[in-house]
Image (cartoon, rainbow, N blue to C red):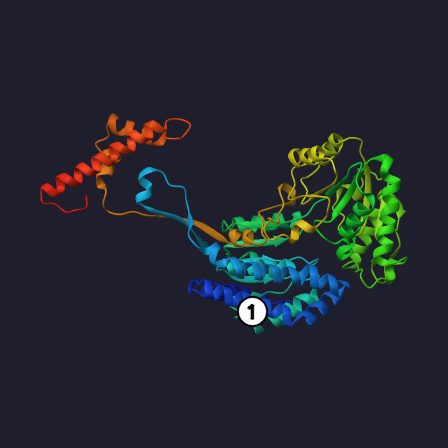
Amino acid sequence: MVRATPVASIPKIVAASRQAFDKGALRTVAQRKDAIRKVATMVKEREADFVAATREDMSKPAFETKVTELAMVLHEAYNALDNLDAWTAPQKVELEGIQHLDTQYIRRDPLGVVLIIGAWNYPLQLTLVGMVGAIAGGNTVVLKPSELAPATSKILTEMLPKYLPAEVATVVEGAIDETTALLNERFDHILYTGSSRVAKIIMAAASKHLTPVTLELGGKSPCIVDSGVDLETTARRIMWGRLVNCGQTCIAPDYILVKPSMKGKLVAELAKARESFMGPDPQQSKDYGRIINDMHFDRLVGLMKGGKVVLGGEHDKKTRFIAPTVLDNVDLNSPLMTDEIFGPLLPLVPYETIDDAIAFINAREKPLALYIFSNDKSAVQKVETLTSSGAYSVNDCLMHAAVAGLPFGGVGHSGMGAYHGKHTFTTFTHPKAVLKKQLAMEVANNLTRYPPYTDRKYNIIMAAIGRTKEKSPLLAMVFYSIVAAAVATAVFVARRAGGVADV
């Protein structure tokens, strides 16, 4: 039975979060840092509870929970604590001419109340990383964990109030009814991780309030293996990228583009890598998880019909075990090659030239990630330039998601918007333009902006607009000299007449 927050209480929960924001719950940097430190403390103090929860939900190995979930949250928290002063400082802008007499900058303002709808495959990372960034931006947060990871949802609901006030960050549990109730409320930003089908529902609901959304979706992330690479290292990195979290990772390599002449050697190296990681029987490995539920298990077993198994293929429905599996001779029109796999299956797709690989990728939806293993700099640059993807990684898989300085997000069908590190802070704040002028210097306005409008005033304005180093630096110099002379003359006349010192 799914744990659920009473639907009738959801408007009150959102209202309390809104009220806390309006009262300035996280307006100061000190308040935000204090809240982020408490999140980090929760992650460290409750590590064993979180590990047990993900083990119960999907048999996730403790090491993977610690590294791919909790360490990611801590990394986000520490990065925010180290950089929040700089992120919140006024941002200087480029000034021109007499603009130097004014004060101008960009201020990052919090948006308000943020809704974060997480996914089941990384139920801690995909809720708490976004929450840390939202808090860093000064927002209050409502979390909606996935009902498909009930143990993790339960532990978040129980633990979060022990470290943060409910009005600052709270959890709403449940499934469709509860999510629908949340989407009926007005939020200032929604971060959703999941499928493109549900993303369309999220966008439609958000549009009623003109609420911006960040959508972290998925897709089929290609992996190109070029000739001349170290196949042993390549195979190990690809196999690791596919078996982490039992393949249930949105940026995992979804299929391998490989030249026919290399196919046999690559499969042999993938087999060696698999045995090196998990021994001769992956089902006995303590470092390998399981499929989340029976529905996804049945779906994955069905996908195997789209190709010939050349490695693995073993599965056990009772424990929802599916071995890391490589498939050849795949049907490009089968669900194996049209749907995101989201499991430990790796189809092989032949290609002859880099241009062929690029054409194959570009004929499909834009992926969340694109990988290439190559020593050929021109091939690497060509793929980078001529394809579109959320991320592009050379000679590795998944690791770009661990770099705080890189944005994590999709493009097209794989999502919109990005987060991680400063990009999370940017996503959850508004760049407010600030201009502060003096009441002095009115003579400059008299020369240009006030009626009666004249050709002379127009020419002065156009001279200023046309000032660039490429066009006419001399013209600009003349324009600013005229303004300076006019100001000096006005000041002199005013003083002679006994007027005020400032004009």
Residue at point 40%, 26% (across, down): 471
Residue sitting nearer the eye, 269 or 107: 269
Q: Quadrant of the C terminus?
A: top left
Residue at point 64%, 64% (across, down): 174
Residue 42, given in percent of the width and then of the height, sits at 61, 70
Lateral position of residue 408 relative to residue 208, left or right: right
Circle 1: residue type: Lys
> How many numbered marks appear?
1
Residue extending furthest toward the left: 497
Task: Identify the residue position indicated by label 1 in the image.
Answer: 38
Question: Crowding at label 1, few (<14), some or many (≥20) Cα neighbours within 10 Å?
Answer: some
- Badge 1 element: helix
Instruction: Check the image and report above or below for 342 versus 78.
Output: above
Residue sitting nearer the eye, 316 or 402: 402
Residue 71, given in percent of the width and then of the height, sits at 66, 62
Q: Quadrant of residue 126?
A: bottom right
Q: Quadrant of residue 297?
A: bottom right
Lateral position of residue 233 relative to residue 444, left or right: right
Residue 129, given in percent of the width and then of the height, sits at 60, 59
Residue 4, given in percent of the width and then of the height, sits at 64, 67
In this rendering, does residue 97 appear at all? yes
Residue sitting nearer the eye, 265 or 198: 265
Residue at point 83%, 56% (across, down): 277
Q: Quadrant of residue 225?
A: top right
Lateral position of residue 400 relative to residue 27, left or right: right
In this rendering, does residue 2 appear at all? no
Instruction: Check the image and report above or below for 114 versus 44.
Output: above
Q: Quadrant of the N terminus?
A: bottom right
